[in-house]
Amino acid sequence: MKYSAKIRNGLRWTAISAFTAGLVAIWGCILSEKPFHPVKYFDLGTPDTMMVKGVDFKIENVCNSSNTRLKMAYRVSDNRIETDDYNKWIQNPGSLLTRYLRVAFESDVPVKRKNKTVTWLLNGGIDVFEIDLPKKEVRLGLNYYIVRESDNKILIRQYRSLTTKLETMEPEAFARAMTVNAKKLAVKIRNDILKLQADDKKHANSRRSKTAK
């Protein structure tokens, strides 16, 4: 079938216009795509041992009631918190701290002696786990109590608020500072255990002295 020159030119320009529109659409999609941004995950590392020889001490559970879940939380003013989509904790703060303390206080009491050893249990709750950008510090706040397993008597009840200054303003530094806070907390808990151990020995000696009389 023969077409007039006018029709052929019209078809040619229609094809060119369609091709050009296709290229524009493709490039528009390419240019509008956000660049790939990998998500980084952080934990508190593996602690040094904090166990007290001859003590059966167990970390039962540390729950999380802070404003942080998995995304890192940044306090940017007195009343405003922002979260980070690309820098996250591998677990929620309660699970992170529970694991850290369990590793730090893994008992050295042999299984065959456990029924002859006083067992103390720790439970707690995190209410602060955040990066304070204006103050350039990382904060950890924890309520906890230690009970004697045999009668559930509360022996120690404490609130600890720990802060560590930031080296640099980057996620790796945030994680390192929070790990320092966790280590400070473990040292304070170890001091609590040493006090309980000393009190326990003191009471045992007192009972023996009374019996001897």
Image (cartoon, rainbow, N blue to C red):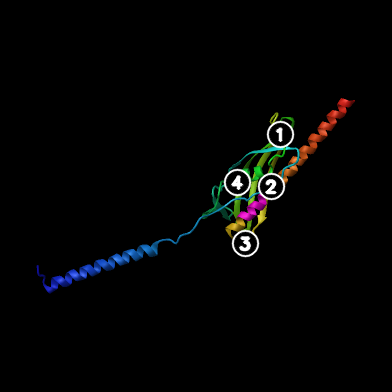
**Residue 8 drawn above or below residue 52:** below
Q: Amino acid at mark 1?
A: Thr
Name the mark nearer the viewer: 2 or 1: 1
Instruction: Judge by depth and name the residue closer to the eye, 112 or 174.
Output: 112
Q: Residue at x 17, y 70 (%)?
A: 10
3D distance between C-alphas at marks 4 and 3: 23 Å
Q: Amino acid at mark 4?
A: Leu
Q: Which residues are magenta?
A: 175-184
- The disc, 4 or 3, on the residue closer to the chain's N-terminal end is 4
Element on which disc 3 rests = loop
Element on which disc 1 rests = strand
Q: Which mark is residue 168?
A: 3
Q: Given contact means CB atoms under 8 Å apart, are the residues at marks 3 and 1 in contact?
A: no
Was residue 201 drawn as part of the magenta stretch in this picture?
A: no
Q: Residue furthest right?
A: 213
**Residue 114 drawn above or below residue 70:** above
**Could you say where residue 64 lies in the image, as x and y percent from the top left?**
58, 43
